[in-house]
Amino acid sequence: MKNDVRNATANLNIDDYINEQITHIKQTVGNKKVLCAMSGGVDSSVSAVLTHKAVGKQLTCIFVDHGLMRKNERDEVEAVFKGEFDMNLICVNAADRFLKKLEGVTQPERKRKIIGEEFIRVFEEQAKVYGDAEYLVQGTIYPDIIESGSGESSVIKSHHNVGGLPDLVNFKEIIEPLRLLYKDEVRKVGLALGIPEKLVNRQPFPGPGLGIRVIGEITKQKLDILKDADYIIREEISNAQLECNVSQYFAVLTDLKSVGVSDSNRTYDYTIALRAVSTDDFMTARWVRLPYELLEHISNRITTEVPNVNRVVYDITNKPPATIEWE
Ligand code: XMP
């Protein structure tokens, strides 16, 4: 599928699309080996499963755990792709080396660059281990192609994804089985391939992960606080069955400490900010009017269950002027 242009109104038959892609991948790859950088996100997961359907164990997926994933994320990815789908999945535990590189770094753009570069380095090392792989699978989707084609707009944030890999690693060809699909179609393909709904309908998660949701310097302690707080907001939005009404929701660990009180004692601890937005295209977004009772419940849970947090605030800013992520 080399053609980069599609007719937006064309009606896509999902089963036909899957079968065409499987045939195409089989023909391209033959009996050679394939690598895939799997992030656990929707696009790379669907690309990997589609490729796995075509070439089975010739495909090896590499999941770089940079320690900036959400709570339990790595386990979930392993359970689905290794457990249910029986795919070759290598999880590289690189959390310590990412933290070391990020020591003392506070500037958002610098963090993004470091995380992006280190990701490539870890992947490169792994690619050498599987040096006989000739093909690389990427989860590029149609909006990625359109966006990268428009060179006029200024860079507000340098988005990190695995787009830079092929330049550094010597592959014969890049396989992009979703390059002509919009996000909703990618989800349909994912469901048709039997990927669990929970994973397919996942909210977007930025490449630099929690690295851009810990404001200021990233430390293991701050990451642990954020993971626990973020888990609570996700759990409560799910319990309230609001996942479909909110495009993206998460916690941010601000770099702000303030005075509080606990059991008649003074505390001086972190402030967690909650963010929940609805959007069609992520270029603009509105903050979601979550019910006060739900916000109160989340706040109570975070301040009682997560150590070192004594204050929770709710971000009531649209995009623009704010962006969705805080960094
Ligand atoms: P912003 O913060 O720019 O976010 O309003 C818009 C959407 O993009 C996601 N985002 C990223 N995704 N790498 C990514 O893959 C990044 O560096 C990155 N920064 C922001 C953000 O989560 C939101 O969905």
Image (cartoon, rainbow, N blue to C red):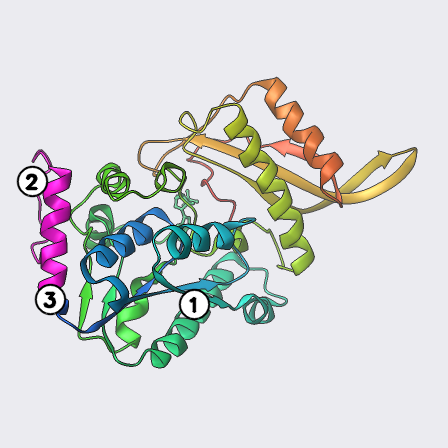
Asked if labels 3 and 2 touch by Cβ distance under 8 angstroms, the answer is: no
Q: Secondary structure at mark 1?
A: helix
Give me the residue at 14% from left, 54% from top. 22
Distance from mark 1 CB to nearest ligand 1 atom below 8 Å = no
**Front-most of 110 and 251?**
251
Do labels 1 and 3 touch, CB within 8 Å?
no
Residue numbers of the magenta segment: 1-28
Q: Amino acid at mark 2?
A: Asn
Q: Is residue 281 above or below residue 208?
A: above
The image's mark for residue 28 is: 3
Q: Classify 29 as above or below 214.
A: below
Q: Nearer the viewer, mark 1 or mark 3?
A: 3
Q: Position of residue 306 (x, y in %)?
A: 71, 42
Ranked by sequence position, the earlier of labels 2 and 3 is 2
Which residue bears the numbered disc 1?
A: 119
**Of the residues tagged 2 and 3, which is closer to the observer?**
3
> Which tag, 2 or 1, sits closer to the chain's start?
2
Label 2 sits on residue: 7
The residue under the point 60% across, 47% down is 227
